[in-house]
Image (cartoon, grey):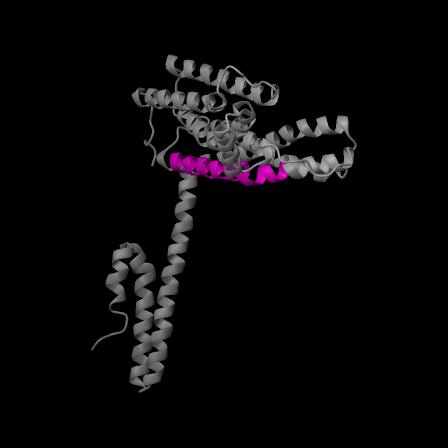
């Protein structure tokens, strides 16, 4: 006699351990077979069909609930095993990015208020948020990683989680730089022009064009030999593109820095060089936006910080690999 649910047992054995089979799977199959046997003894064929349908549905419901419970417990165990390092990193990074976004938006906000009487102020400040997000992410994410992973060498789980966070931050920054920033900038300029000068929306400048529009304008100007006019467009194009890729590069640098447990000469030198590049870049963006470096190509100036940090990252990871104190992957 073929009992219902016999094929479920070998299938479940491939998915679950002996303890789960004994506590969860075997009782569910036993209930199905018992109900089917009762209906068979009473001569109720339609009852048997209904029992089997309900029994199979109950079996798969039990399996789904058990898998969900085990998945949640696995995530919880992973978080506990990593001492909530990823959660701390996300929290610190989000807090720093939020604070930096507000501070970077307040700089042009204060400059406009000193020159014009524009209302409503909340709308004016809102238009300035997108231009602050890329730099806030670039500066806030690596610091958040270093603070979140302090005294906690990253395991493989932590490493891949941070890499995923860096990729998500890069995607967000690219989205803002490519489409949100140009529209917000143009809305901000029109908002100020209409109220302060009584004029309509101004023509779009370099920072108010999307990447595709910038590329077309640059190609057109270069074709006609108007290189001086193309230079501001090159600054905007490469500056925003470099800012879009910087979160990933600088985050991987911070991740590599967190792997160095004890101080070493290589680590100290790399940290000093990185700090100089970091502070110089911050000063060049925030305090000296009018500097155009006419003796250097815009592409070189815009991409130089990323190239330097990528080089430092390679050196730092090599130093961490060769260091006897490195224990990446030592934790499960």
Q: Dominant secondary structure of the magenta stretch? A: helix
Residue at 43% across / 35% down in the picture?
162
Q: Is residue 222 left or right of residue 311?
A: right
Q: Position of residue 228 (x, y in %)?
A: 55, 22
Query: Can you tell which quarter of the image residue 7 is in?
Result: bottom left
Residue nearest the viewer, comparing 131 with 28: 131
Q: Position of residue 247 (x, y in %)?
A: 48, 31
Which region of the structure is painted magenta?
158-185
Query: Can you tell which quarter of the image residue 77 is in?
Result: top left
Say if the magenta span includes residue 197: no
Question: Where is 234 relative to 7, above or below?
Answer: above
Say if the magenta span includes residue 174: yes
Question: Where is 30 relative to 99, above or below?
Answer: below
Residue at 67% across / 26% down in the picture?
107
Residue nearest the viewer, comparing 13 with 148: 148
Q: Position of residue 155 (x, y in %)?
A: 37, 33
Q: Residue furthest left?
A: 1
Q: Residue furthest front?
A: 224
Q: Exactly how many numbered labels are in the figure? A: 0
The answer to whether residue 261 shows anywhere in this view is no
Question: Where is 174 relative to 143, above or below?
Answer: below
Q: Position of residue 58 (x, y in %)?
A: 38, 68
Q: Quadrant of the N terminus?
A: bottom left
The answer to whether residue 254 shows anywhere in this view is yes
Query: Can you tell which quarter of the image residue 59 is in?
Result: bottom left
Q: Is residue 5 left or right of residue 287?
A: left
Residue nearest the viewer, comparing 315 with 324: 315
Q: Quadrant of the C terminus?
A: top left
């Amino acid at each position: 006699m073929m009992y219902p649910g016999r094929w479920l047992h070998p299938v479940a054995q491939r998915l679950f351990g002996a303890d789960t089979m004994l506590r969860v799977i075997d009782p569910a199959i036993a209930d199905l077979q018992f109900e089917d046997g009762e209906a068979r003894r009473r001569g109720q064929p339609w009852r048997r069909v209904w029992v089997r349908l309900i029994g199979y549905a109950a079996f798969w419901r039990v399996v789904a609930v058990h898998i969900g419970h085990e998945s949640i417990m696995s995530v919880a165990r992973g978080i506990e095993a990593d001492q909530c390092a990823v959660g701390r990193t996300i929290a610190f990074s989000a807090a720093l990015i939020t604070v930096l976004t507000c501070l970077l938006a307040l700089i042009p906000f204060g400059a406009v208020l000193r020159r014009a009487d524009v209302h409503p102020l909340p709308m004016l400040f809102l238009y300035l948020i997108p231009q602050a997000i890329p730099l806030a992410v670039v500066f806030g994410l690596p610091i958040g990683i270093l603070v979140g992973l302090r005294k906690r060498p990253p395991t493989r789980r932590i490493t891949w989680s941070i890499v995923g966070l860096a990729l998500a931050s890069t995607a967000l920054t690219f989205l803002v730089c490519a489409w949100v920033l140009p529209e917000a900038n143009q809305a901000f300029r029109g908002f100020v022009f209409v109220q302060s000068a009584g004029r309509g929306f101004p023509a779009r400048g370099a920072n108010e064009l999307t990447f595709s529009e910038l590329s077309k304008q640059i190609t057109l100007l270069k074709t006609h030999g108007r290189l001086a006019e193309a230079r501001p467009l090159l600054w905007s194009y490469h500056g925003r593109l470099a800012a879009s890729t910087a979160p990933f590069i600088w985050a991987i640098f911070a991740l590599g820095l967190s792997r160095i447990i004890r101080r070493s000469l290589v680590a100290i030198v790399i940290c000093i060089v990185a700090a100089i590049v970091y502070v110089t870049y911050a000063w060049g963006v925030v305090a000296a936006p009018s500097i155009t470096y006419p003796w250097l190509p815009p592409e070189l100036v815009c991409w130089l910080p990323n190239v330097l940090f990528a080089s430092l990252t390679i050196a730092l990871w090599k130093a961490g690999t060769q260091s006897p104190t490195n224990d990446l992957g030592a934790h499960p």
